[in-house]
Amino acid sequence: MEEKEGIEITTENDVAVVSFKATSMSNIESITEANEQIDKFIETNLPKKIIVDFSEVKFFSSQVLGTLLEIRARLKEYNGQVVISSINPQLYRVFRITNLDKIFKFFPDKESAVNDTGND
């Protein structure tokens, strides 16, 4: 079976959703390409909120954390926000260990992230 790569960026209810398509996000070229796609999307659309959907991901390298921090920095320039959905418990531990669980908001699934108004 061929491994999927890359990301898909969609919009739901005026919220951008970045879905990782690979189960393993460790290929440097793929992560760099995804980063470039996201940068271009942000530059063109200036989304107020980006949901990063990890539903397909079972493993990721630390470069993915760097990508998330870069996205967060870009959106913070104009009060945008990055949230994470559908991350499995083992991967969530990486966020907890690195204290990144304190700067990102997590949702159990994409739908609840899309429907969140951010007023809490």
Image (cartoon, rainbow, N blue to C red):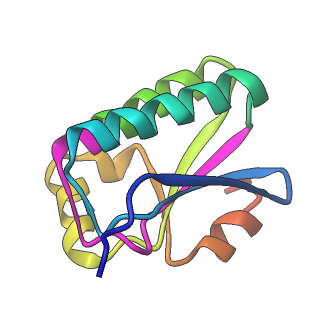
Span of residues in magenta: 48-64
Return the residue nearer the eye: 57 or 94.
Answer: 57
Q: Outermost residue, top direction?
A: 77
Q: Is residue 48 left or right of residue 54?
A: right
Residue name at image x 61 percent, y 40 percent = 81
Quadrant holding the C terminus: bottom right
Residue 5: x %, y % from top left: 38, 58
Measured as percent of width and height from the top left, residue 42 is found at: 65, 29
In magenta segment, residue 18: no
Residue sitting farthest toward the front = 1
Where's the N terminus, which quadrant?
A: bottom left
- Is residue 56 shown in magenta? yes
| Residue 39 percent location from the top left of the image | 55, 27
Quarter-of-image position of residue 29: top left
User: In x, y percent, where is residue 92?
Assistant: 27, 66
Residue furthest to the left in view is 97
